[in-house]
């Protein structure tokens, strides 16, 4: 639209047509006056009228050209201002969208990490509770067995007592080792699944709104933060 207005203001293609129409009007006026000449006075009057019409037509043509040029300049100026304003608003809107998307990605990343950490803590707590229950059941079972043997065999009570508690201690150690092995295996599995989930999910999500460099940077930072938190949690658990 702006280019059309610029071409209109800088070109004069319509001026010949306006001039042609003015000339035709003058020609018709001259023919009309010639038909009604009856005397020298009439001729002079007609000539004067023709001259006046020529001057008026010339003045009007110049006035039309001036008005059209000014109008075209005004339209061009308004269109240029509108274009600049529109470009500014589009740039501002695009910046707002980018900021909003980045903020949302950060929020979703944090929520996702917190959800995984919470789930892992719940699973570990359940395992610990089950292990404690198993140990308590073994101790209770040992005490019951010891009571039965005490009533029937006082001589063998001490040996049975020691043997049962040795078995309990061995079972407890085996359970602890199994728990540690299971916990390490679960940590490793969680880390692997976490890496696969984050890479698969966030690469598919972020590749439509961020550049490749930003995508990789966010993923790697998230992985490093998650691994660091896991190592700290493992150290605290071992202590």
Image: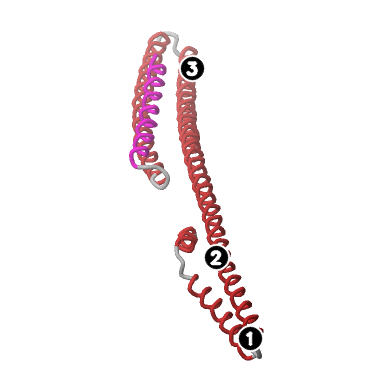
Q: Secondary structure at mark 1?
A: helix
Q: Where in the figure is residue 138, as x and y percent of width and height?
A: 45, 21
Q: If you read the primary sequence from the N terminus, does the residue marked by circle 1 or circle 2 appear first?
A: 1
Is 139 positioned to the left or the right of 195 in the image?
A: right
Residue nearest the viewer, comparing 16 with 189: 16
Q: Residue at x 55, y 81 (%)?
A: 24
Quadrant placement of the C terminus: top left
The magenta segment is 212-239
Instruction: Tell me if residue 149 comes above or below residue 112 in the rendering.
Output: above
Q: Which residue is mark 3?
A: 148
Q: Which residue is mark 2?
A: 62
What's the CA distance linking mark 3 and mark 1?
159 Å
Q: Residues within 10 Å of mark 1 (few under 14, many from 20)?
A: few
Membership of 135 in magenta stretch:
no
Q: If you read the primary sequence from the N terminus, does the residue marked by circle 3 or circle 1 appear first?
A: 1
Is 189 positioned to the left or the right of 83 in the image?
A: left
Q: Residues within 10 Å of mark 2 (few under 14, many from 20)?
A: some
Instruction: Tell me if residue 23 comes above or below residue 4 in the rendering.
Output: below
Instruction: Tell me if residue 211 comes above or below residue 150 in the rendering.
Output: below
Q: Residues within 10 Å of mark 3 (few under 14, many from 20)?
A: few
Q: Where in the figure is residue 216, as x and y percent of width and height?
A: 34, 37
Q: If you read the primary sequence from the N terminus, does the residue marked by circle 3 or circle 2 appear first?
A: 2
Q: Where in the figure is residue 41, as x and y percent of width and height?
A: 66, 84
Q: Which residue is mark 1?
A: 40
């Amino acid at each position: 639209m702006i280019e059309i207005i610029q071409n209109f203001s800088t070109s004069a293609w319509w001026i010949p047509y306006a001039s042609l129409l003015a000339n035709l009007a003058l020609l018709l006026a001259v023919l009309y006056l010639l038909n009604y000449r009856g005397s020298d006075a009439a001729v002079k009057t007609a000539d004067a009228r023709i001259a006046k019409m020529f001057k008026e037509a010339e003045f009007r043509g110049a006035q039309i050209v001036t008005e059209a040029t000014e109008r075209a300049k005004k339209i061009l100026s308004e269109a240029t201002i509108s274009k600049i304003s529109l470009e500014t608003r589009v740039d501002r809107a695009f910046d707002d969208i980018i900021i909003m998307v980045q903020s949302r990605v950060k929020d979703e990343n944090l929520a996702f990490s917190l959800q995984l950490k919470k789930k892992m803590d719940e699973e570990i707590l359940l395992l610990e509770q089950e292990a404690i229950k198993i140990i308590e059941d073994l101790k209770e079972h040992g005490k019951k067995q010891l009571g039965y043997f005490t009533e029937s065999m006082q001589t063998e009570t001490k040996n049975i007592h020691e043997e049962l508690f040795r078995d309990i201690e061995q079972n407890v150690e085996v359970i602890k080792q199994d728990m540690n092995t299971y916990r390490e295996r679960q940590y490793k599995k969680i880390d692997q699944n976490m890496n696969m989930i984050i890479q698969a999910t966030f690469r598919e999500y972020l590749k439509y709104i961020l550049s490749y460099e930003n995508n990789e940077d966010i993923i790697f930072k998230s992985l490093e933060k998650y691994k660091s938190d896991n190592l700290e949690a493992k150290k605290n658990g071992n202590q």
